[in-house]
Amino acid sequence: MDMDVLLGIGRFVLATTLLLLLTIPTAFIIIQIELKVIALMQLRIGPNRVGPRGIFQSTIHGFKVLAKEDAVPDQADRATFTLAPWMVYMAAAMSMLVIPFAPGAIAADMNIGVIYFFAVLGLSVVGLLVAGWSSYNKYSLLGGLRSAAQMVSYEIPLTLSVVGVVILTGSLNFTEIINHQLAHGWNLWWQILGFPVFFIAATAEINRAPFDLVEADSEIVAGPFTEYSGMRFGFFFFAEYVALFIMSTIMVALFFGGWLAPWPFPAQLGGFAGTIYGLVWFFAKTYFFVFFAVWMRATLPRIRVDQLMGVAWKVLLPLALVNLFLTAVAVVAFNL
Amino acid sequence: MTAVDPETRIPDPIDLDRAEEERLRAAAGMGPAPASSGAGGEYAGFELVGVPDRPLQTEREVEMYTLEEGEMLVNMGPQHPSTHGVLRLVIKVRGEVVTDLDPVFGYLHRGIEKLCENATYTTVLTYVDPMDYLASMHNEHAPAIAFEKLYGIKAPPRAEYIRALVVELNRVFSHGLMIGFLALDMGGLTPILYSFINRDEVVELLASISGQRMLFNFFRVGGVNWDTNDEFLSRLGTWHANVRKTIGYNEKLITENEIFRGRTRGMGVLTPEQAIAYGVSGPNLRASGVPFDVRRAHPYSIYNELEFDVITQQSGDVYARYLQRIAEIKQSLHLIDQIMDKMPHGPVQAQVPGIIRPRPGRAYAAIESPRGLYSVYAISDGGQTPYRFRMRDPSFITLQVMPVLMPGHLIADTMAVMASLDPVMGGVDK
């Protein structure tokens, strides 16, 4: 066999292993942020028992989930019931392949990275629908149908708002999109209309507050996750926070210059130092948006299901189309 | 291995479920389940879980539990994250749209009325505390007045002022909690915590005068248990200086919030006619525009000496009920100011023997609790315990309008409407 092929396979295995391993601390960190930040916003102390200042609270939650009984409802469709958490988790984990962490730190720098990302992330709706259907529970069923309606609707404005960026930068490759921003400034400034649409649609796509209708605990208990326990529930829970993380990373890559520093001196460095420098900025920006999502969750009540669909089809979709039109006209007229 | 005797075999749970299903279908008059071949056979009866496990008795029940094509029953509660304790709502839905609703009560029934009929008049006041557990002071107020009427005594003026003070304090935190729970049932996580800041301060305040945090046991026939003390007065001063700020947290977070307004305006509209027809009272009635407040309509205690207006809203929707609570909190603060200004000196307890034996007769006392008209009807046969002791709890009456308000709304609105009516299951189930 060719040496290049072997190297390629080795690189792929290494990258996917690292990414899968990355999901675990990522979920723990975000859950910990959520526990602590919401507590502070609610004038509580928050978890402070496990580890210094309670920093291992989410980790111990993770291990607790492992130790729990794995109950399956009598009437549940066992095969699909078992498979659903994996589908949701793998959709989140697989989409991490194209995340541009730093120069040279991309698992697969494919030329259709943007398309791949949204295609794979969209798969998680299948998992949620399957979970809702196979649980033999009415709350699960309602939650599953809600997830299908919500995620399919919001994918349209979400992807349309990204098309603006793609037209502007002329590429579907994340590295090129970021390098374009090095030359022309953050896409945010060129996509003043596109970014809000993307932000709202992305929040809805990953079922975060105020769009967390899928698992609206005060209405449908836990939606598709109602009947899940033990590590199966843990996978859903993990996937949710990993999805928040990757949606933040993609927001950073598309609109906030990815690994680029916010100032031009220097926006990026070469070599290994450049990778570290990029990683620092990338994670700093990403966790800002994670924090922002937590902040929204502490502040906003939940939107209702008909309002949710109204926002998608009556507000976001027209705005995304207007943005697309304006971007296309601007690119042609000013030869950007 | 020996063959299992079919007579003694323990039935498979799945077989039991099938039998249950058949019984449910028969109860709903739907005939036997279709054979499990073909689409949906495995899920037959799924939509019917929630039908009462007894023959349907009234036309209303038959109407409620007979499903049309595409409808199913969703059984919310008694174990559900947001049914305020053990309220059970059987909801008939078509997709997400509620077509009918049946509130089921009784999961918290403790027989408080019967307990009270076996207790002496002085000890009855300890049993009524856990009824409406967010308004324990009000729970004690009505029986105290009723028994004083029965026995023919009057509480001293200072006792009446202290009573008015503690019930208004209680009203402040009860309405505050309603705002928090309303937001919580709509997915807002934070307001409830802010409500509890104020609630905890008031509860500590009341504990410093009564000795207990939740079930105060503060009222006595012919007065109150304790006079005000230094700790109470200093706490009251601190609380009073901060309370507008702590209530303001929630107002800032909720009142102008676009999502909150979008979800509450025009939702669960209770017309004045419906409200009166169903006997709804209290803030829910006033939010529908009917200016009825027991404190004004049938003044008791010292309320005819205080200046206040009956606040009303116009629209009668969830948002109006929210605004009504906010306005009433401010009104209560205003009343507390007046009470503290006017409070006379003197004893807080009339001379009453340990065991009261009123002459045979009957007495009725109604007060304005945070949930509406709370009244007590007591009959004495001359013995040391009430012959009959009846309590009208406003939550129980208020929840009866749920089937009227809900059809056409979504499942998510069920929780908002229910929370806006502010039921307390301890009072509903007694």
Image (cartoon, coloured by chain):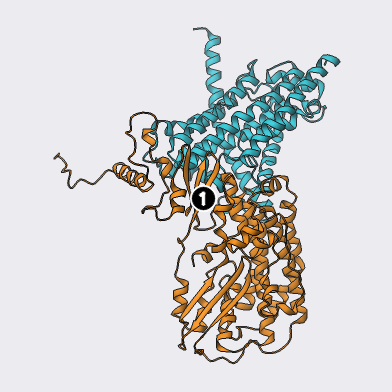
Residue at point 51%, 86% (across, down): B361
Q: Secondary structure at mark 1?
A: strand
Taking depth in this image into account, of A304 and A264 the one nearest to the observer is A304
Taking depth in this image into account, of B42 and B242 the one nearest to the observer is B42
Split into 4 quadrants, where in the image is the C terminus of chain A? Answer: top right
Q: Which residue is mark 1?
A: B101
The amino acid type, in three-letter code, at marker 1 is Leu
Q: Is residue A110 left or right of residue B250?
A: left
Q: Residue furthest left?
A: B2
Looking at the picture, does residue A43 appear above or below residue A272? below
For disc 1, the neighbor class at 10 Å (few under 14, some 14 to 19, many from 20) is: many
Taking depth in this image into account, of A328 and B1 the one nearest to the observer is A328
Q: Which chain letter matches label 1?
A: B
The chain painted cyan is A
The chain painted orange is B
Taking depth in this image into account, of B279 and A311 the one nearest to the observer is B279
Q: Residue B41 appears at what percent x and percent y?
A: 36, 33
